[in-house]
Every structure is written in structure tokens, then in C-alpha cells.
Amino acid sequence: MNPGTVYLVGAGPGDPELITLKARRVLAEADAVVYDHLVDAALLELAPPGCERIFAGKKGGQVCRPQDEIDGMLVRLALEGKSVVRLKGGDPFIFGRGGEEASALAAAGIPFEIVPGVTAALAAAAYAGIPLTHRLHSSAVVFLTGHEDPAKADATVHWEDYARLKATLCVYMGVRKLPVIARRLEAGGMAPSTPAAIVESATTEAHRRILGTLGTIANLAAREDVQAPALLIIGEVAAFAESLSWFENAARLSAAR
Ligand code: SAH
């Protein structure tokens, strides 16, 4: 039997309407869907009724399945001749381990395709009214992970270096390490007055936005009890959030109606 194709598919940031038409088509044709915890349940309904649905997150008491177990599952399903959708939050190649999964498929000789998705930084910025680039204020955007232990000697994110780029910094998975991240950017020379924003559960009904500065954002996040998933955006462009606040305004209007 010929192996089936594995599609590494970006599900977008939360709102199920923000998935691509291509993702919708491969889901509708899938024999098996392997999905992550940030994926909206409505998207699983796009798969046909007989499709196998496998949650790649929790297993027994464990928080996460080991990555090699997921890789092995994708290979096994494809070898059974199935068309497999590996559905991931946001984009599969941005902090999504899509690279590891694609490598495992390539090594096993399984045909695969990547279907990009709207990554959280783009969605959080759009819904918070923050243009990530701006002709007058920012010519570069950096996607960083705050997940690493910044105290780790061999950490790959050397925060002080990013303080001097004059770029917009988008930090994924940064909630827990926010105080250290802010301190280290300041230590690298970024002004404490630099505008900063946190967008929690962007594009979903739980969407929440907290605006401050590099110097205040960690305390504000603690006071507001910010929870994952949340995206931290730092840079001059974050100041636009006040005047370009379209999503909050729309939500307020519909609540008042
Ligand atoms: N592949 C995903 C990222 C996975 S890492 C993507 O491209 O978006 C998970 C992190 O993404 C979270 O810790 C959070 O920082 C961010 N994230 C995911 N969904 C989000 C959302 N709806 N709002 C804000 N941040 C989100």
C-alpha cells in the first residue's frame, strides 16, 4: 500500500474563521486528525464523521506526549494509507515543532505538505490594533520564545542583544518569565518608557489586552493575573493600540446593543 500524505496544518490563533481554505479542504478529506490543545473544537467538526480524532496533548496523567511518540504516530497512520492532518495552533513552523515533525516524516519517506496558518503574533497584533511594522516607527519584527529558562547558561535568547534592534519584539510563551525578560531588555539599554502590550487569548471570546510600558508591563500582568496563551509585544508601535482599538470597541458596541 502507498503511504498516505501527512499535512502539517496551521489552525490559526483561535477564532476558527481564521483558518485557510486549504486547511479546511484537507481537514474535510482527512482519515485521521492529530490535534493540539490550542485548537478550537469547531475546527475538528470540519473533518468527516468517520475520521479518527487523536489528541496529541495529554496522555494519562502526563501533560504532554513525548515528541518522538507523536512523530511515530504520524508515520504509522500514514503507513496505514491514511490521509493525516496534524493540526497545530497558529502556524506549524513558528514555535510549533513542525520542523521536527516534518524531519521525522522526511526521514521515514512519508509524503508531507505544510499548510501555513495565522501565527499568534500576527493575530494578537491585528486584534490589539498594533501595526507590527510602520513606515515611521518600526522596520523589523522579531519572534522570540520566552519559554526558555533565561538563567540557563546556554540559553539561545540573549535578551540584552534584542534591546538594541529598534525592532518590534513579539514574545511567545513569555508570561511566566515576563519580569526577567523586561529586566534584561532594560539591562540591554531599552528605555523603560518603551510601549508594551500583552494580548491574552487573542481572537477568542476571552480576548484581553493590557497596555503599558517595558517598565510597567510585568507588574500590570501580575495584577491582572494574565494567563497563557498570551503574546507580549514590545516596541514603539505598541503605542498605536490606544487609537486603533477596533476589536474592543466592536465588542463594547455589541454588548451595549
Ligand atoms: N505555533 C503557534 C505558537 C505555539 S507556542 C503559533 O504560530 O501561533 C504557544 C504560544 O503561542 C503561547 O504561549 C502564546 O504565547 C502564543 N499564543 C497562541 N495562541 C494565542 C492567542 N490566541 N493569543 C495570544 N497568544 C497566543
Image (cartoon, grey):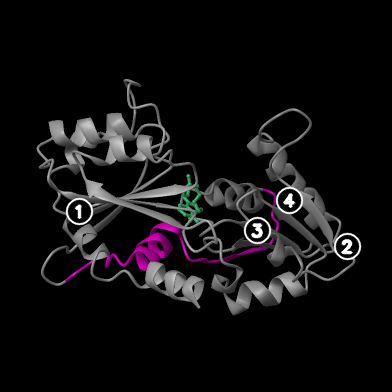
Read off the residue under disc 4. 74
The magenta span reads 108-134
Whole-number angstrom distance, CA of label 4 to CA of label 1: 39 Å
Q: Nearer the viewer, mark 2 or mark 3?
A: 3
Amino acid type assigned to the residue bearing label 4 in the image: Leu
Q: Nearer the viewer, mark 4 or mark 1?
A: 1
Query: Looking at the rendered structure, which numbered label has been put on residue 235?
Result: 1
| Above or below 246: residue 199 | above
On the rendered structure, is 74 left or right of 156? right
Amino acid type, mark 2:
Met
Label disc, if present, on residue 174 of the rendered structure:
none
In front of the other: 196 or 103: 196
The residue at the point 65 percent across, 50 percent down is 36
Verify whether residue 213 appears in magenta. Answer: no
Label 3 close to label 1 by CB (< 8 Å): no
Q: Earlier in the sequence, mark 4 or mark 1?
A: 4
Kindly tell me whether mark 4's CB lies below 8 Å from ligand 1: no
Q: Quarter holding the N terminus?
A: bottom right
Sequence-first tag of 4 and 2: 2
Per the rendering, the mark at residue 1 is 2
- Residue at x 76% of width, y 35% of height: 59
Query: Helix, strand, or loop for circle 1?
Result: loop
Which tag, 4 or 3, sits closer to the chain's start?
4
Give the x, y percent position of residue 220.
Answer: 31, 40
Marks 2 and 1 sit apart, C-alpha to C-alpha, by 53 Å
